[in-house]
Amino acid sequence: MGFALALGSLPKPLLCGLLKPVLASLAEIISFTQDPETKYTESRRDAVRALMRIFEEVDIAEDGDGQSSINGEGVTLICDSLFTAAKDYTTDNRGDIGA
């Protein structure tokens, strides 16, 4: 799961045509809940950062194809993922480290 920041760092031309699977992969990382207290907390945080960077970088078109621009379905996926991340209150010896 260490690829989240790499996906978020891709330039816009490389994201176009692959946007739907990239967003789906990041959303899957964010919603990963198997043993959330001890694993993958940093990966979930990195996926949120990557998702926000892509959201800022790529064009948004409600009637777009979802591959080269974020369409309504993509916006819903991003919002749902961010709401899921907002509920992550994973803690360790450092305190709250959730996404």
Image (cartoon, rainbow, N blue to C red):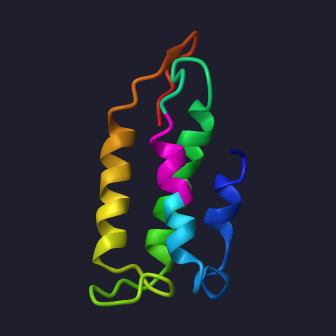
Magenta segment: does it hold 28? yes
Magenta residue span: 25-32
Q: Position of residue 99 (x, y in %)?
A: 47, 37
Q: Nearer the viewer, residue 9 or 4?
A: 4
Q: Main secondary structure of the magenta part?
A: helix
Magenta segment: does it hold 99? no
The answer to whether residue 76 is above or below residue 64 is above
Give me the residue at 39% from left, 41% from top: 85
The answer to whether residue 92 is above or below residue 62 is above
Q: Nearer the viewer, residue 27 or 9?
A: 27
Q: Quadrant of the N terminus?
A: top right
Q: Position of residue 5 (x, y in %)?
A: 66, 55
Horizontal side of residue 24 vs 88, given as left or right: right
Q: Position of residue 59 (x, y in %)?
A: 42, 85
What is the number of callouts on the image?
A: 0
The answer to whether residue 71 is above or below residue 65 is above
State the residue lying farthest toward the top.
93
Give me the residue at 58% from left, 9% from top: 93
- Quarter holding residue 62: bottom left
Q: Position of residue 66 (x, y in %)?
A: 42, 82
Give me the residue at 34% from left, 80% from top: 71
Horizontal side of residue 66 vs 10, given as left or right: left
Give me the residue at 48% from left, 44% from top: 30
